[in-house]
Image (cartoon, rainbow, N blue to C red):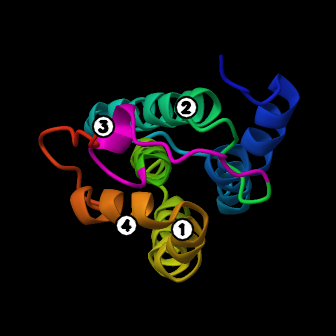
Amino acid sequence: MTNSPSGWRQARAILQLPFVVTVVVPACVLLLEGAPRLAPWPGWLLGLPLALAGFALMATTIRFFARSGEGTLAPWDPTRRLVVAGPYRHVRNPMITGVFAVLLGESLVFRSAGLFLWFGTFVAINLVYIPLVETPALRARFGADYDEYAANVPAWIPRRTPWEPPR
C-alpha cells in the first residue's frame, strides 16, 4: 500500500504549475494578441494531436508521481521515492516534455507568435533550471539510485527501449 498524496495536494500542485503554464499564461497571451485566430487545417492537424498527446503524457506522469513516488510534481511537495516507472523508464523529464508538447501544439492551433515565444521561453527556463537546480536536488535526495538512473535514462530525448532498474 502506498502513501499517495491527497487529492487536494495533487490538485494544488497541478493548478499552480502545469495548469498555469499551459492554460492561464496561454489564455493571457491570446487575450493580449486580440481575438484568437484558429489556424487553417494544417495547423490543427499538427497542433491538436501534439497538444492532446502532451496532456496525456502530463496526466500519466502525475499519476506516477502520486502512486510510485508518493508525492506531487511540485518542488515544495516532491516525491518521497525515486520514480523510475512508466514514461520515466524512457526519459527523465516526461512531465516537462508533455508541457512542451502542449505549448507547441497550442501555438500551432492558434497560429500565435506570442504562444510560440512563450513555448521558447519555457523551454529555455527549463534547460537552465533542471540541470542547475532540479538534478542536484534529486542527487541529494536519492544518491546512488539517482546517479544510476541518470546514467541510463536520458534527460530529454527518450530512449527507444525502457530502462530496467536493477533489482
Say whether residue 81 is left or right of residue 146: right
Q: Which residues are magenta?
A: 77-93
User: Label 4 to label 3, Cα distance in Å?
Assistant: 16 Å
Q: Position of residue 36 (x, y in %)?
A: 60, 46
Q: Which amino acid type is shown beneath numbered disc 1?
A: Phe
Q: Residues within 10 Å of mark 4 (few under 14, many from 20)?
A: few
Please say if the residues under marks 2 and 3 sit with CB atoms less than 8 Å apart.
no
Farthest residue, direction right: 8
- Magenta span dominant secondary structure: loop
Disc 3 marks which residue?
Answer: 167
Residue placed most toward the observer, 56 or 28: 56
Q: Is residue 90 magenta?
A: yes
Viewer-proximal residue among 16 and 93:
93
What residue is shown with label 2?
Answer: 68
On the image, numbered disc 4 is attached to which residue? 147
Q: Identity of the amino acid at label 2?
A: Ser
Image depth: mark 2 or mark 3 in front:
3
The residue under the point 57% across, 70% down is 134
Residue 155 in view = no
Mark in front: 3 vs 1: 3
Quadrant including the N terminus: top right
Q: Report the residue that reaches farthest toward the left.
A: 160
Name the secondary structure under disc 4: helix
